Image (cartoon, rainbow, N blue to C red):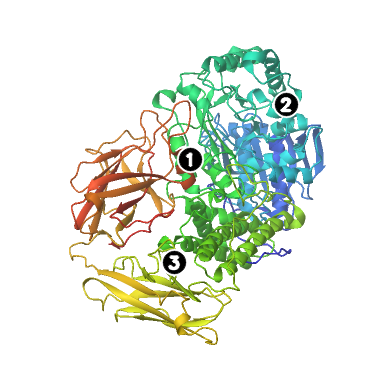
Amino acid sequence: MRLPTFTATALFAASVAAIGQKSTVNFNGTGMLLGSSNAAVQIMVEQDDWPAVLRVCDDVAMDFGRVTGVNGTVSLINNGTAPSLNSSMIYNTTGRTSHQMGQASYGSKGGVMIAGTIGNSSIIDCLIQEGKIDVSAVSGTWEAYVSVMVANPIPGVAQAMVIAGSNRRGTIYGLYSVSEQIGVSPWYYFADSPPQKHDKVYATNTTAVQKSPSVKYRGFFLNDEAPALTGYIMAKFPPSPWGPGFNADFYKTVFELLLRLRANYLWPAQWNSMFDVDDARSQPLADEYGIVMGTSHTEPMMRATKEWNVFGKGAWQWNTNNQSIYPFFVEGVQRSKPYEGVLTMGMRGSGDTALGSGIETALLESVVAAQTEILDNLWGNVSVQDPNIVPQMWCLYKEVQGYYQAGMRVPDYITLLWTDDNFGNIRRLPLTNETDRVGGAGVYYHFDYVGDPRDYKWINTVQLQKTWEQMHLAYERDARTIWVVNVGDLKPLELPISHFFDIAYDMEAYDEASVPTWLESWAAREFGQSVAAQTGALMNNYSIAAGRRKFELVDPTTYSQIDYSEADRVLAEWQAMQSVAQSIYDSLPAAIQPAFFEMVYHAVTAATTYYDIMITVAKNNLYASQGRNSANALAQHALDQFAHDHQLSVQYNSLLGGKWAHMMDQTHIGYQYWQQPMRQALPGLQWVANLERDLAGDMGVSIQNSNATVPGDDMYHTLSSEVLTFTNFDPYGVSSQYIDIFNMGTKPFSWKLSANASFVSFSQASGQLSTNGSTDARVYATVDWSKCPPGSGMVLINITASEAQSTMYDQQTLYGTQYSMPQLMLPYNHTVLPSNFTNGFVESDGHITIELEHWSSKTSANASALDYKVIPGLSRTLSGVTLFPVTAASQSTSSGPMLEYDLYTFSPSVAAGVLNITIATTTSLNTIPDRPLKYAIQLDNQTPKTVQYIIDQPAGANPTGWLTAVANSAWTSTSNFTYSGPGAHKLKIWALEPGLVLNTAWVNLGGIRPSYLGPPESYRVV
């Protein structure tokens, strides 16, 4: 892998519509010319419209300049009559400021756009009254807009694109939709996505009606922001009197990003900052932009945690110090009252901790009562009870959910903000009797976290398919008022942030199979249509692979070096992805490469490097235990990759002259417990004494699925036997296994393989090995089943060796002073399927593995309403299978939909006559307390067994086994059945609750060996 460099060059030119939006512009000459390389678009806006709208008109005018080379002109309309030529007005904390933009004038060669907010723009209201635009579909709704071509909208203008918003953000989203369609990504600043270049931009003669967003408040939380984001802030912005400079100059870029992503809500950074205090401009500026401000789950009444640490008096304990905390709350609400915001109600302990040692509902109820009193005094009781006037939320995070479970309630005009478990699994959602709350419900979700079982805040580990599944569940269960996601440092989570806000804006536009299509659209917007399909597929694979286990939880022991070639297969997948990323990167114009580096290349390459380090360390340890000279080369490779990891971080931090300095400072190698390592530290390596010969001689041999090595003694095979035995070969699974031949001494040697059966062949029958350990020989032994006799048997493989030089050793001492020539035993079982088995899975190696989307048949109680659907990629290996609709009632084995799998086994018996079947599901939790997730499973005609695999705990605690499940990205549960013997069998599975997502089944006939992902899918007859 080589590190890229960046130089300036011409940009790509490709048309792409805004993701999820109806296209209203084109570049092919159809419709009205809006702007070109020699004609400026003219944007007209009522001067008394919202300042936020005026500011965005300014942005769009500049966006046309980014695309065509000629800035647009913003003209203020005075009371719907005459335009103020060439003047745009933006509003800031010091008042309106007039400035010139471009050289176009009224009636210039460029086209005209008219933008305004219904009820706030006299020209829009006039067009409505004259019947020139129809806004009935959006008027009075939340953040909706209409875009339509209008003839003769005002005197002197023959035609104009008119954008009418239902409120200020409706107008803003309509305007920014044009920006995105013409080629300006929302990430043009934060990820350096270059604007697409076009000579001409045309307005299509079409009407676009954009309904209200699926979720009312859509935002993110800048959290866990050290060392990366805080380091960046300290390098780029002057400090405040109280700490790092998280000031208005930084936040204005965040506000704009949110709006361009069609979001509207922000929880600001708070580890070592105070949004309202660090810079007095920040809160007014947020409102001028149109951003709804909030504070996190642990910061009530619009006060940052640090504000109490700096200005508070006494302990943060309501029961002993409410006389100080009460006025602290009052000041926060008074300060925020003029601006649009959502108030956090309730109270938690200092520093994201519990309020007390137990569930003290009376204490928290007294807090909420006092907070309500404060709001009543400021707004009046009627206003406070209207969430459209005074939005409030109670975040049921961690132990706070326990208060709700214990019976605590808040007024129904307060939004209940349910949460995930910090690992993307929603813990609770509204019940049927909770959906009529005036304040509604929402979800606080995580793409970043600090805590058990391990921090994850380095690079993107978000599985987009899981995000869709969990948020779709929330949407269908009426948690639609607030969605806020913890995004850590913001960078480098551009991809999952984009996806989150797109589905929050219009969930109904995206179904269970939408992620690959969405990814291709995203890639087209950011990098151009020519690489969209390839990049989308790459990031789909990345999303699945990264979702298997957080990088921070992957260590040298995670993947098996021995069984199923698991570690090698996983590393090969990552290396294949990195090769694709490199190929795409190399094909891009230089000006696009920085954006690709930030959003794709770095993530894929850093992840590949990380996996290479961990798997190489594990292999080094294994090879050293086997006495291989090659262990030393692996140790050096691990050191090289460790250095490469550092170089990648430096490359990121130095990108574009250090624009994103410190954003890749997060430590990620060397975890000792849940908290981040204070310094990068490579896991333990081993070196062998390459100047000394192994006691067993120069040649060593090992085989697939075994730690053992011969000749010599070790704990993995019978002492001094010099014989290793392969796992069983059979035609429906294992036809080839490898033999490793390696040097563990000080002399080169020649080797030769021979088998006593003609149906066994070798990929290489002889060779030579030097002493430098750079090349072990991996030889594959293969059975040719067309030549193999029926039934079972054993093949003997001899491995002979001779020294290249015999001056020191003769043939008798080649294997040391007490060992002899190694031998391998190859057991085979030439099984044959009956001709009438035409669909299903076949046993091999003592097991059957089933990816559960590959059912033989399925039944449905009502095919038009309730059915199993596949969510591609929602798994550690392939996909998820779940019931739709997710609002369905509980099911039973007698009437519920069923999945059926045909199996064929050859094993004559199993231990104690008991066959174990393990099911892997996603890590979804019980979101309905009295309807825990469960499934039923049946083998043949035995009684179905109901399995409830998640056991909830009281007081808001996570369920039993949660730490292991979220670390492994799967719940697993095992059922036992009587084994009736070889032949055809039927496995039946019922999902008894919607929300349960089935992944994989393993039928263990005694052959399953330890691994992280389990044995790969078995041979399947179709």
Q: Amino acid at mark 1?
A: Leu
Which of these two is toward me, 717 or 381?
A: 717
Q: Are marks 1 and 3 in contact (CB under 8 Å)?
A: no
The relative height of residue 329 versus residue 702 in the rendered view (above or below) is above
Task: Write the residue at 56% across / 32% down.
Answer: 142
Q: Earlier in the sequence, mark 2 or mark 1?
A: 2
Q: Check the picture and name the quadrant holding the C terminus.
A: bottom left
Dot 1: element: helix
Above or below, 953 relative to 690:
above
Number of numbered discs on residues: 3
**In this view of the protein, which residue sits in the foreground, 826 or 972?**
826
From the top left corner, tell me how far across and down residue 259 is, in percent. Answer: 64, 40
Position in image of residue 872 (x %, y %) = 42, 52
Q: CA distance from mark 2 to mark 1?
A: 32 Å
Question: What is the C-alpha distance between the residues marked 3 and 2?
Answer: 63 Å
Q: Amino acid at mark 2?
A: Asn
Q: Counting other residues with Cα less than 10 Å from the Cα at mark 1, is it few (<14), some (14-19), or many (20 or more)?
A: some
Instruction: Specify the label residue 309 is tagged with.
Output: 2
Tag on residue 963? 1
> Crowding at label 2, few (<14), some or many (≥20) Cα neighbours within 10 Å?
some
Q: Amino acid at mark 3?
A: Asp
